Amino acid sequence: MDTLEAIKQQIESNPIILYMKGSPNQPQCGFSAKASQALMGCGERFAFVDVLSNPDIRAKLPEFGNWPTFPQLWVAGELVGGCDIICEMHESGELQTLIKETAAAQSQE
């Protein structure tokens, strides 16, 4: 399976997925730390991919999602955005609503 196929499969099989540097418990950059903290604050499970240990994904995801930086949050197959957008949505309450609704829809399937 090529890298773009792997990315598609990850996004399709995980309703909430964060591509980041490091892991939520050990982020390797400040932006990834902020984004994962905001997401963890929503109280739902989410998948993550450490792009530092997956250089092929790190190289290909920016062209796949047309978004140049990390972290990248994907919800229900759609790119939500990076750190600034995630943090703004968290502060406004939009992120929690989106994450809760997505998790609820997933549990009904």
Image: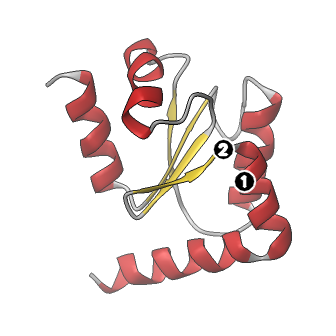
Q: Residue at x 68, y 69 (%)?
A: 95
Three-letter residue code for mark 2: Gly
Local SS, label 1:
helix
- Is 67 on the left-hand or right-hand side of 28? left
Q: Residue furthest front?
A: 66
Q: Quadrant of the N terminus?
A: top left
Local SS, label 2:
loop
The percent position of residue 13, horizontal first and vertical second, equals: 29, 54
Three-letter residue code for mark 1: Ile
- Is 99 on the left-hand or right-hand side of 34? left
How far apart are labels 2 and 1 at the CA level? Answer: 6 Å
Do tag 2 and tag 1 residues touch (Cβ < 8 Å)? yes
Q: Residue at x 35, y 49 (%)?
A: 11
Q: How many marks?
A: 2
- Is 48 on the left-hand or right-hand side of 43? left
Q: Residue at x 45, y 13 (%)?
A: 55
Residue located beneath label 2 in the image: 82
The percent position of residue 62, horizontal first and vertical second, equals: 47, 28
74 relative to 66, above or below: below
Q: Residue at x 47, y 75 (%)?
A: 102
Residue located beneath label 1 in the image: 85
